Image: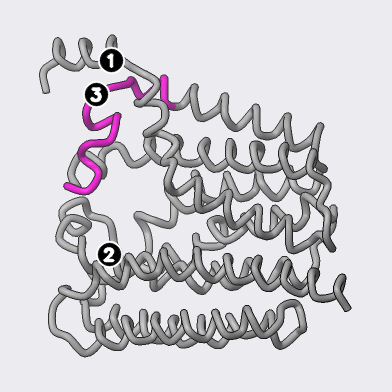
Amino acid sequence: MNEAVAEANIANITWKTYLALCKPKVVLLIVFTAVVGMLLASAANPPWATVFFAIFGIGLAAAAGAAANHWVDRRIDAIMARTQSRPLPQHQISPISVIGFSLLLATLSMVMLVTQVNLLTALLTFISMIGYAIIYTVFLKPATPYNIVLGGAAGATPPLLGWTAVTGEVHTEGLLLFLIIFIWTPPHFWALAIKRREEYARAEVPMLPVTHGVAFTKLQILFYTVMLVIISVLPFTIQMSGIIYLSGALSLGIGFLWHAIRLFREDGDSHAGPTFGYSIFYLSMLFGFLLLDHYARIIIRLWL
């Protein structure tokens, strides 16, 4: 794209460009898991003012990290077909504007969390932002095929942030919610990486299918899926959740195992896309069952 066209595109910047920088679908899932953490940490009636400000504070932090990721990955995004339509590769906005936007969102997030929620949640949210935008994106992603395992901790914090927003403390239950997403992250991203391995190779990103091959990656997906199914039962084991959640977790886990086994047994990457899609459905529904079980047990206790 020549300079004149690029300048014209930047001059016509709209709110849709800024929205795209925030990765709204990703932020929506992050906020949803954070809200589940807040509601699970509340016996019945959560402090709604805290919930409101925590939603916006955590959401703004997630959007800030997403915008920073756009800036760091702009070279890679221009190479990969999946990301070529993003604002920076399309010259819809200047890199310096993206950085300014990210810093603005991060500042608003921290001010909101410190003043309206609590210092612990603000601190953990800040660490998560740095972990994703800098430690993962800048250092881990281009350096190791296990980048998503090591960097997945940043993306696993939302339900823990939600928990601390309401309680002001780190509890076992909040850490367990963190652990579920932490173990879910590798099979989720590796399924996508298998599908896009040639693009990652061209962009010189050492994702696991590129460095160790598809067969090895499929085995790792199956291994982590088995671990995930086992860990997903722990909320029931520690009496954090009841039979409704257990039934949902096992049903969803069987579905995830089916996808992982089919992906492992089939040649090529034909089932990588469905596995990736199911992983998103799995996490959303798993946290939905946590919430359903929580309020079902509250209602039952009120009736008895």
Is residue 7 covered in magenta?
no
Residue type, numbered disc 1: Ile
Tell me the residue at 55%/80% (across/down).
Answer: 249
Q: Which residue is label 1 attached to?
A: 10
Q: Is residue 267 left or right of residue 11?
A: left
Residue type, numbered disc 2: Ala
Q: Which residue is label 3 attached to?
A: 91
How many neighbours does mark 1 have within 10 angstroms: few (below 14), some (14-19), or many (20 or more)?
Answer: some
Question: What distance separates the C-alpha of mark 3 from that of mark 1?
Answer: 6 Å
Q: Position of residue 149 (x, y in %)?
A: 47, 68
Residue placed farthest to the front in the image? 303
Establish if 193 lies above or below 6. below
Q: Is residue 226 left or right of residue 75?
A: right
Among numbered discs 3 and 1, the one appearing first in the sequence: 1
Is residue 96 covered in magenta?
yes
Question: What distance separates the C-alpha of mark 2 from that of mark 1?
Answer: 31 Å
Q: Position of residue 268 (x, y in %)?
A: 13, 78
Of residue 78 and residue 56, the one placed in the foreground of this image is 56
Q: Which residue is label 2 attached to?
A: 193
Question: Which colour scheme appears in the figure?
Answer: one colour
Residue type, numbered disc 3: His
Q: Is residue 231 left or right of residue 225?
A: right
Of residue 276 and residue 104, the one placed in the foreground of this image is 276
Of residue 145 and residue 176, the one placed in the foreground of this image is 176
The image quadrant where one finds the N terminus is top left
Among numbered discs 2 and 1, the one appearing first in the sequence: 1
Q: Secondary structure at mark 3?
A: loop
What is the magenta range? 81-98
Q: Are marks 3 and 1 in contact (CB under 8 Å)?
A: yes
Tell me the residue at 54%/67% (across/down).
Answer: 181
